[in-house]
Image (spheres, rainbow, N blue to C red):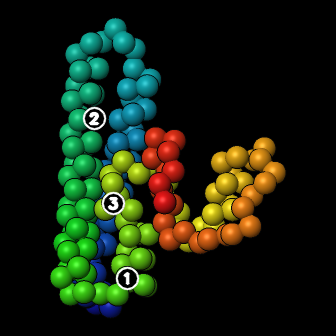
Amino acid sequence: MESEGLGSQKAAELIKYVKDSFQFEAFKDLARDIDQSDFVDVPKIIDLLKEWQLIEAREFYKLSLGRIETIKKFESYIDSGVKEVPTMHNFIKTFPWLLDPRIIEFKDEVRYSKILKEKYPEEHHIPDEDKRIDFCVLHSQLIYL
């Protein structure tokens, strides 16, 4: 691949991408097999579910590795004292699960009046003072600012 202008690092990333794509396709094929199987063949269903667990475990493993690297980067930002804006702000905007892994929805730099209009559309009186909020998090139907 180096003859094609790809360095060894880029070639390794490309191979990993192709491999991951294949595994994802295998995951979809497995889901289709489970969906189309007759539930009479119990041993086949058990084998398919075991295979599903392996694929799912690999995906969680990859997710965990990515999150560990993100946490290390976050720690390095804290240790080096980076500025809140733009570095830390943008990092948390990109990875809101650092604040709480249960976050459902995350918005940054929203206006107070917009939140009120979305949450209470029937209300006609919106306060005159319209403050900007750095982060707005939706968790279990509650809004955290």
Residue at 42 percent across and 84 percent down: it is: 85
Q: Which mark is residue 52?
A: 2
Residue at 27 percent across and 50 percent down: it is: 59
> Which mark sits nearer the N-terminus, 2 or 1?
2
Mark pair 2, 1: CA separation: 42 Å
User: Looking at the image, is 52 positioned above or below residue 103?
Assistant: above
Q: Label 3: which residue?
A: 99
- Say which amino acid is labelled 1: Glu
Residue 51 vs residue 101: left or right?
Answer: left
- Say which amino acid is labelled 2: Trp
Residue 107 vs residue 13: left or right?
Answer: right
Given residues 80 and 30, the one toward you in this image is 80
User: Looking at the image, is 39 positioned above or below residue 138?
Assistant: above
Circle 2: is it few (<14), some (14-19), or many (20+) Cα within 10 Å? some
Mark pair 2, 3: CA separation: 30 Å
Residue at 25 percent across and 63 percent down: it is: 66
Of tags 2 and 1, the one toward the viewer is 1
Residue at 78 percent across and 54 percent down: it is: 125
> Which mark sits nearer the N-terminus, 2 or 3?
2
Label 3, secondary structure: give it. Answer: loop
Q: Label 1: which residue?
A: 84
Of tags 2 and 3, the one toward the viewer is 3
Label 2, secondary structure: give it. Answer: helix
Circle 1: is it few (<14), some (14-19), or many (20+) Cα within 10 Å? few
- Say which amino acid is labelled 3: Leu
> Which mark sits nearer the N-terminus, 1 or 3?
1
Q: Which mark is residue 8?
A: none
Mark pair 1, 3: CA separation: 15 Å
Label 1, secondary structure: give it. Answer: helix
| Quarter of the image where one finds residue 76 | bottom left
User: Looking at the image, is 31 positioned above or below residue 72?
Assistant: above
Counting labels gives 3
